[in-house]
Amino acid sequence: MKHLLKLADLTSEELIHILDLAQQLKSQQKQGIPHNYLKGKTLGMIFQKSSTRTRVSFEVGMYQLGGSALFLSSRDLQIGRGEPVQDTARVLSRYLDGIMIRTFTQKEVEDLAKYGSIPIINGLTDYCHPCQVLADLLTVREYKGELSGLKMCYIGDGNNMANSLIVGGIKSGMEVAVACPKGYEPDSGVMDYATANGTFTLTQDVKQAAADADVLLTDVWASMGQEEEAAQRRQVFQGIYQINSEVMEVAKADAMVLHCLPAHRGEEITADVMEAHAQEIFDEAENRLHAQKAVLVSLMGNQ
Ligand code: CP
Ligand code: NVA
């Protein structure tokens, strides 16, 4: 593994290895055992969109691993004024040991990897959010013991989270059921992959997708960059594509609920379900740190 551009690039063994390493790093951190595997290494973090969790967890993760992180806002970089990504990649490769980028197009991330000579980590594009889903899988595994054989249900927009959850779920042996409105389906290539490699269903019926689920996930109806579509999307999703107590009734009695956050209570998830599952959801947020430290060590470590 040279980069983390999307989960589809990882073998199931590589995915499980990252989760195992994340668990080990988490336990070292909790016990106060030094784990400065990236001493002297610097990660550049390019942000073309807002972030709370990704920014803070990567920065703290690098610090805990003995390295350092640079926050690079596209508002300040020449890339924001049109300097080509091909040039930015080659310049930053001379200074840094790795780059985490959050941007709009997947192509920009793939181009950074193509033209640069250091590991590139996708911190969210319109297409996928691999770091979040590694944290999600880590959280499910902590609560349920293992992933294989579980049923994952995603309700909502067929967005970056849906795409990564489908790939991550299938790669770890889960059954994946998605409920989303017509016209808002996940990426067709992702769905073809899921159908060919596991048990995948797509429906517009929320309760059908949620039936007997072990873990339910959702995400905002309008993602970053879709602000102008928010009102129209609300009309399509409102009152249907939501995790609420009625939906929870058809899931397994011990079903987990996860949300990548930020959450819009009363839209994709009700406040009562969110609060009832706050422990899982904030463990999931914490696990961004541990999962990403495993990615950083795997890509930038010396071993
Ligand atoms: N879930 C997630 O990626 O959060 P941020 O947008 O705050 O980084
Ligand atoms: N789908 C959301 C995820 C935020 C972490 C977005 O792209 O805005």
Image (tube, rainbow, N blue to C red):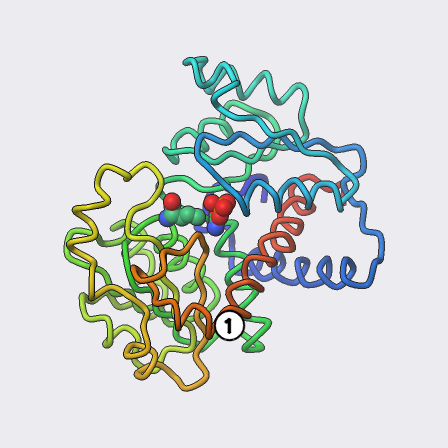
Name the residue at 41% across, 58% down: 165
Query: Residue 158's x, y, as percent?
Result: 28, 53
Name the residue at 60% across, 35% down: 119
Q: Of residues 179 and 268, which is closer to you in this image?
A: 268
Horizontal arrangement in the rendering, residue 72 relative to residue 111 (left or right): right
Q: Quadrant of the C terminus?
A: top right
200 up-or-down from 253: above or below: above
84 up-or-down from 218: above or below: above
The outermost residue toward the right is: 33
Q: Of residues 94 and 233, which is closer to you in this image?
A: 233
139 up-or-down from 285: above or below: below
Name the residue at 32% across, 83% down: 249
Query: Residue 164's x, y, as percent?
Result: 41, 53
Amino acid type of the residue that numbered disc 1 sits on in the rendered structure:
Leu
Horizontal arrangement in the rendering, residue 34 relative to residue 187 (left or right): right
The quarter of the picture where residue 227 lies is top left
Query: Could one spot residue 159 in this view of the protein?
Result: yes
Query: Residue 177's x, y, as percent?
Result: 31, 69
Q: Quadrant of the N terminus?
A: top right
Secondary structure at badge 1 equals loop
Query: Residue 225's x, y, as percent?
Result: 32, 36
Residue tagged 1: 147
Horizontal arrangement in the rendering, residue 212 relative to residue 20 (left or right): left
Horizontal arrangement in the rendering, residue 290 relative to residue 226 (left or right): right
Query: Could one spot residue 9 in this view of the protein?
Result: no
Density class for disc 1 (Cα within 10 Å; few <14, some 14-19, many ≥20) is many
